Image (cartoon, rainbow, N blue to C red):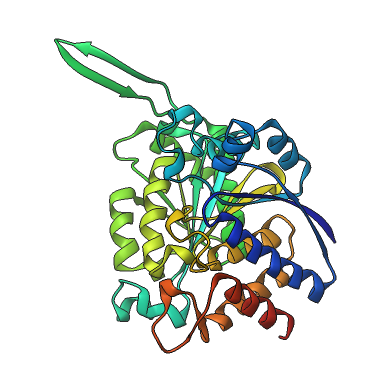
Amino acid sequence: MKMNIALLKGDGIGPEIINEAVKVLNAVGKKFGHTFEYTDLPIGGYAIDNYGLPLPDETVAGCKAADAVMLGAVGGPKWDAMPPEKRPEKGLLGIRKALSLYANLRPVKLFPPLAFASPIRADIRDKGIDLVIVRELTGGIYFGKKSESVSGGRAVALDECVYSEEEIDRLLKVGFELAGSRGKKICLVDKANVLKTSALWRKRFYEIGGNYPDIEKSVMLVDNAAMQLVRAPYAFDVIVTENMFGDILSDEAAVLTGSIGLIPSASLGEGGFGLYEPIHGSAPDIAGTGKANPVATILSAAMMTGTTFGLKAEAKAVENAVAAALTKYRTADVYTGAEKLVSTSEMGDAVAALLENN
């Protein structure tokens, strides 16, 4: 296969970690006979400094012409004083909207060599943590009408939460298809005892679920789900939920692994087109020092090969190489003293070498 990937390296450690993902992708191409071509495009603070805005038109056009997109990170204190509509983060929100990315996938997997870093009790984590949160990304209360008024001399604020069947159905289908390729279990998280939107989510969950008779289905109220993620994370396979609940629960779940430097993510649109990125920020304080952990970005590249390109064996090979590398090599954020302390580029070298030689 021949694939063109748009690279939005962005700010801070973004260029460093994207470079390591490219290194591993090139190793995939060499081992499996694929060709990856890359187009560098500006976004975030870098784009502001060089083009005057966080998301130039050429970036949007380049991403639409690509087969998939990889993003490093955006933002930093250099641009914090800018008006909200001109800050680097606007580039990230803008590209998601421009590409119609509506489903966010965030896998949370605890690698056994890094179990020590998890805050979860050993008897719980030893049962295994391997789940995916599928979050609706373009609807709900974040995108509803907002207003402020005064009533009786006191301020009143309104945030409207709206969901249509179309928005719900397309997200649920992503969740069910994913569950079918994993452990065949799916849990809808909602607040159906209080919210009308959640009641519609639950109704559609069971109606859409009728098309997937082999998948075990359950529902859970969001407050209980927040507790169960800590109490029994091993019980989950795929969690599907609306925008705000997914935002909160995915950040909670990320802590289970002990380091946000290990968590990849995908934002998907129609036809499986996706933007892939680590969940962490630009970490400007360590940019250029070689301390950044590239694993989340490398795993994001693995998600891209398996999800958008359908190369399941190649994706698994990257995941296996990462797991093997972590038994011998560590960046500073997960270093214990028993392994070899390596730089960002050395970690990428280790993963690429293990991939090619196994």
Q: Position of residue 60 (x, y in %)?
A: 69, 36
Rendered position, 214 above or below 220: below
**Residue 183 in sight:** no
Corner quadrant of residue 309: bottom right
Left or right of 31 in this view: 216 = left
Q: Residue at x 36, y 75 (%)?
A: 117
Query: Foreground: 237 or 199?
Result: 237
Q: Position of residue 230 (x, y in %)?
A: 31, 65
Q: Position of residue 149 (x, y in %)?
A: 27, 13
Rendered position, 15 above or below 123: above
Query: Foreground: 328 or 81?
Result: 81
**Residue 175 in sight:** yes
Corner quadrant of residue 151: top left
Tally of marks: 0
Q: Residue at x 66, y 82 (%)?
A: 354
Q: Quadrant of the C terminus?
A: bottom right
Left or right of 262 in this view: 97 = right
Q: Position of residue 48 (x, y in %)?
A: 57, 35
Query: Foreground: 38 or 266?
Result: 38
Rendered position, 79 above or below 133: above
